[in-house]
Image: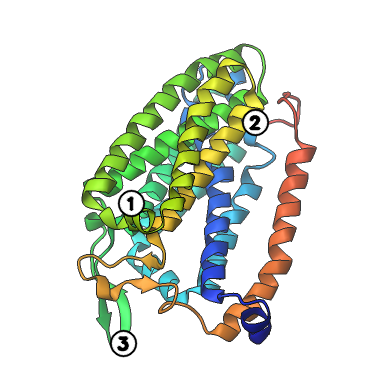
Amino acid sequence: MTEFFTQTLGLNLNIVWFLLVGILFTGYAVLDGFDLGVGIMHLFTKSDEERRLMLNSIGPVWDGNEVWLVTGGGALFAAFPNVYATVFSGFYLAFMLLLASLIFRAVAIEFRSKQPQGWWRKAWDLGFSAGSFVSALLIGVALGNIAWGIPLTTIDGHIEFAGTFLGLLHPYALMLGVTTVALFAMHGCIYAMMKTEGPLHEKLRGWINNTVILFIVCYAISTLLTLVYVPSMTEKLRETPWFIVVAILNMLAIANIPREIYHKRDFNAFLSSCAAMITLMALFGIGMFPNLVLSNPDAVHSLTIYNAASSQKTLGIMLVIALIGVPCVLVYTACIYYIFRGKVKLDSHSY
């Protein structure tokens, strides 16, 4: 099996799995990103009807979107077990907090409509928004630490995390966390506008420009900090100039969002937001390659797609499984979005 992929097709399985894991996490960022964004914007709505519309805009799809996170985590475990072990042990408290936030927001979605009392629903509204905000912030902080580098050391031949939880909360990582919150808020606001109509639709349209401006400001600051303090993330762009095309596409996608909103092409604005997120993840992957976890300050301990990978035989077998499983996930996702297309309508079965 491995010979077929490597010799017959000429594939480098390590690079293939780097791309596949990146695609799965990109899918999660794009799909669950608007879920989290809707949650972040949830408390800005005032009436119970508006909040129900916000919840039901993601109601049929939010749990399916999280399949991409589970699939991405499984792929990381199968292809790069050393990375999985090091990151999940080093970021243990952060990941537990992330899981608690995701679980709490899921419970809030399901429990909110169980009682009609105002205090009950407001409490779960707060939990839904808080869980969404904390989840988005922690995802950004994790990405910031991976780009910045984390302290790794070798103990008994194994690379292990040598830092602390508080050490992960440095200014650069926190700035990327805030940028991620702004990105998801923009993405979620566009999605909610696309799925609603009437007064809430117009209210969301008025909010989008503010979320776009907030994201652009945060993005500009994060980019400046990256250029000054994390120059390793731009090395591939200097070595291979045609990668600049990805950065240009990213800027065009972001710039096209206000244009589509102005012309009231809501779906096109959402596609532009998706394209912006995809190209952002692509730039992150380009900057990291071939590293998966950068060691800082001693780069010799970095985990790469080669020293942290499973055996070639395992990568080959898992690729066969992925070629069967990933299309199933894609078909499932497409079917759900097709079935629940159109504007949100509240009925007796709604949240």
The residue pinned by badge 2 equals 57
Identify which residue is drawn at 59% across, 20% down: 50
Identify which residue is drawn at 62% across, 77% down: 10
Nearest to N terminus: mark 3 or mark 2: 2
The residue pinned by badge 1 equals 144
Structural crowding at the residue carrying mark 1, measured as other residues with C-alpha within 10 Å and reported as few (<14), some (14–19) or many (≥20) = many
Identify which residue is drawn at 39% across, 60% down: 288
Amino acid residing under circle 2: Ser
Q: Position of residue 127 (x, y in %)?
A: 46, 36
| Residue 121, above or below 71 | above
| Residue 99, above or below 273 | below
Looking at the rendering, in which quadrant would you find the N terminus?
A: bottom right
Q: Are the residues at dot 1 and dot 2 in contact (C-beta closer than 8 Å)? A: no
Front one among 118 and 41: 41
- Say which quarter of the image contains residue 341: top right
Q: Position of residue 303 (x, y in %)?
A: 36, 72
Nearest to N terminus: mark 3 or mark 1: 1
Q: Is residue 52 visible?
A: no
